[in-house]
Amino acid sequence: TAGQTITCKAAVCWGAGQDLVVEDIEVAPPQKGEVRVLILYTGICHTDEYTRSGKDSEGVFPVILGHEGGGVVESVGEGVTSVKPGDHVIPLYTAECRECKFCKSGKTNLCSSVRATQGQGLMPDGSRRFKCKGQDIYHFMGTSTFSQYTVLAEVSVVKINDKAPLEKACLLGCGITTAWGAVMKMPSPGVANSTVAVFGCGCIGLGVLNAARLAGASRLIAIDTNPQKDSWAKKFGGDNVEFINPLNLPQGKTITQHLIEITDGGLDYTFDATGNVQVMRSALEAAHKGWGVSTIIGVAPAGTEISTRPFQLVTGRTWRGTAFGGVKGRTELPGIVEDYLAGKMFVDEYVTHHTTLTDINKGFGYMHEGECIRCVVDM
Ligand code: AHE
Ligand code: ZN
């Protein structure tokens, strides 16, 4: 099939707010510096729903969503050297070119090589590889994993150990790695022997708890309005996790006041895993005066803004954020896959639901239910 257009199935979102429609699409061969990948499994992340719903300011339609995939290289374009047909790979929505100002800075995992075109739903040369009913279809996050075949920039692909089962490892393409990195790549001194609170116990929040436990946090507090998340939080963070439902606080107490009270002044580290800007503020203000660090992981709806009194920062709290956990995909993801294979971190445990490409909309439905952590789509 190398060099030829492939016809396959993909879930197309024709317009903002519409359900996905499984269509026969055409996938053009990979051009120079590109890789065509057979996607075997993909997770569904809230960011897919966010863009589907029309809330993403970068959203363009018609589009093939999906960014948490696992697959096998089918063919490569001219000049591609880092992967070859048959390699097991994970698509990277945060590319790593190793040549741009960002990559060379040593200070960030953000890479500028393909980000501008990626945000417009295009390949780096400004064109598209998907067609349906004669119409060009936009790419998404440089990945478009809701297609049986997708085309990626070489800088947006990483080869992983083929012993890792792709029906689980696909989840390392977004949620789990993001949470893991947000904790493990925290600037010094890091979460060891520190108090940690995480707001939101979905995939990201549970990943933070799992990583913070391994990193040796001294106290773990999990916050969620869904009481069922208590047992989930303990499963991922250990039996000592203290679960707080902010809907059940003593009369008149805010979550921030309560946390400050029970921790003698606040937490060393807090994490927002909700994408809610009010929660982000609570997380920042629950960080300890003088040194507390609050990390934003959740993606907030377009148009919303965060606020706090500047005094909160003047008095030594740090507000930071992270994309893909600060992980450099091509350099660091293979090692994270090894950590998974060595049993150091949970991955299988996040999979609560399965669906097929045909029933992908059901997967979006599961996501709105509290008991779904991750739904894996068998493509
Ligand atoms: N397009 C949105 C921004 C979306 C966003 O913040 N994406 C996260 C990843 S979400 C994964 O589920 C991210 O890492 N962003 C870094 C980047 O380069 O986009 C908007 O608001 O415009
Ligand atoms: Zn995601």
Image (cartoon, grey):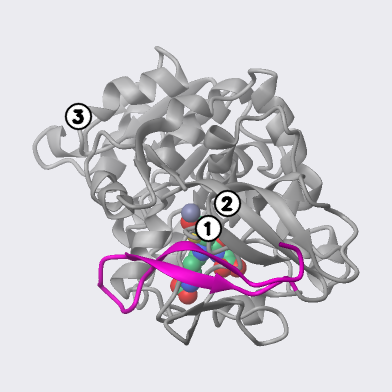
Q: Where does the N terminus fall, quadrant-wise? A: bottom right
> What is the three-letter code of the residue carrying label 2?
Ile
* Element under disc 2: strand
Residue 231's spot in the image, x, y percent? 30, 20
Instruction: Pick whichever of labels 2 and 1 is earlier in the sequence.
Output: 2
Q: Is residue 243 magenta?
A: no
Dot 1 alpha-carbon crowd within 10 angstroms: few under 14, some 14 to 19, many 20 or more:
many
Dot 2 alpha-carbon crowd within 10 angstroms: few under 14, some 14 to 19, many 20 or more:
many
* Element under disc 3: loop
Q: Is residue 73 left or right of residue 241?
A: right
> In this figure, which residue is indicated by the disc labeled 1?
145
Whether the residue carrying mark 3 lies under 8 Å from ligand 2 is answered with no
Asked if one can make out residue 300 in the rendered structure from this viewpoint, the answer is yes
Residue 160 sits in quarter: top right
Q: Start and end of the magenta stretch?
A: 1-30
What label sits on residue 39 in the rendered view? 2
> What is the three-letter code of the residue carrying label 1?
Thr
Asked if one can make out residue 328 in the rendered structure from this viewpoint, the answer is no
Dot 3 and dot 2 residues touching (CB under 8 Å)? no
Which residue is at 34% across, 68% downward?
52
